[in-house]
Amino acid sequence: MIENTAQKTGESSRELPARIVIPPIRGEMVHLRPATVEDLPRLDELDAFYGASKITGKDAAAERALVHAWVRRSVAWTNGQQPAESGVGDPESRRTVAWAILTDADHDDDGEFDAPTPNKVIGMIFLIDVDGWSRSARIQVILGRDYRGRGYSRDAMPRVMTFGFAPQPAGLGMHRIWVGVPEKNSRSNSVYRSLGFVPSGVSRDALWDTENNKYQDLIVMDTLVDEYDPIRSLDAFGMHVFEDNPGVKEALSAREHSLAIRQTVDLGDGETAVGESEHSGETPAGEPKREDHMNEAEPAAGESTGRPHPANAGASGESEPESNWPYGQSERKTSKDAWWRTLGRGRKRDTEGK
């Protein structure tokens, strides 16, 4: 998907490619295609900028201007046009990738398509501030007023993030994807948490609240490539994994590799425990038996296997409150301590990109 025409010297270049081919992406309820300038009037028809102050922290006029600029930057990148601010290859120049969100779903089962006509645009999704040097990007979704709160964001975002994190040429090769959430936008905050984002900081008084005529904080949330599990994010909400989507095969391969290594390490720990027990001849008083340790190490029922989602996805019971929440506080590990970083592929920060 990536046509990297940048010159490389010695080590791998951190410059963004001069041109990008934006791939179509298939979802459960939506499908995505590259956004065009011709799609922009549709957003006004959808009243997509309604409530922008609460959702993004900007008023409707400012949000409209930003979205128009993002789409034009995305189109320029696909055409191989250099950023206007620089006539040379700037490794820190920021790019944008824009998709139009279309749906032919009947979400409320009333026998009619959710959109006025099938395959009609209902919003857009963006990867903006794409930074080749830090391999970071910000994700943003905009939906028509009548298409919010129906699960379209949960369907589209994990698939776009999978493309963003996938190594080149399958994806953008990002290390970090982040979002900025106004402090009063608690609804989006919970959606982002369900997708694996965690708060990483607060920019104090970073936004102007036009409704209340005062400044408000901007909550920064992010996730890293070795923390994010796109398969689990989809599986937890009963959505299918489409292997033909960009970056999915790479995500499945990496996940299977990490799980296999984890199982090997667990088995190795078990063998060590057996050897120690045989050597001593008895279990020390007050210590649990080996069977207890093995039971603790077994994965919880319903844990995602990383395989394509079956047709009856989402039919699991509700025995545990956290079972439908893909990233519970008790399970999440920070990037520094994540087992798949320390055990998975022997990744070293100081040799990244070589």
Image: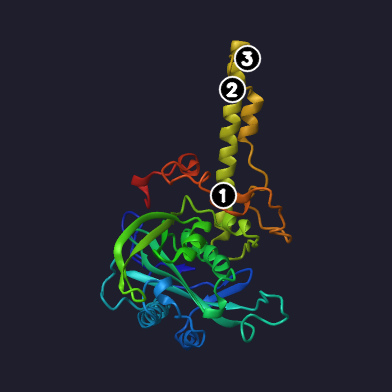
Q: Residue 293: in sight, yes or no?
A: yes
- Of pointers 3 and 1, the one earlier in the residue sequence: 1
The first of marks 2 and 1 along the sequence is 1
The secondary element bearing badge 3 is classed as helix
Please rate how many residues cluster around mark 3, counting C-alpha atoms within 10 Å: few if below 14, some from 14 to 19, many from 20. Answer: few
Residue 178 or residue 347, whichever sits in front: 178
Q: Does dot 2 land on a helix, a strand or a loop?
A: helix
Q: What element carries label 1?
A: helix
Query: Residue 335, image x and y in percent?
Result: 43, 46
**Disc number placed over residue 278 in the picture, else none:** 3
Disc on the earlier residue, 2 or 3: 2
- Report whether 252 appears left or right of 74: right
Q: Residue at x 59, y 14 (%)?
A: 285
- Three-letter amino acid code at disc 3? Glu
- Which residue is pictured at 56% across the width and 65% down the height? 154
Classify mark 2: residues with Cα within 10 Å, few (<14), some (14-19) or many (20+).
Answer: some
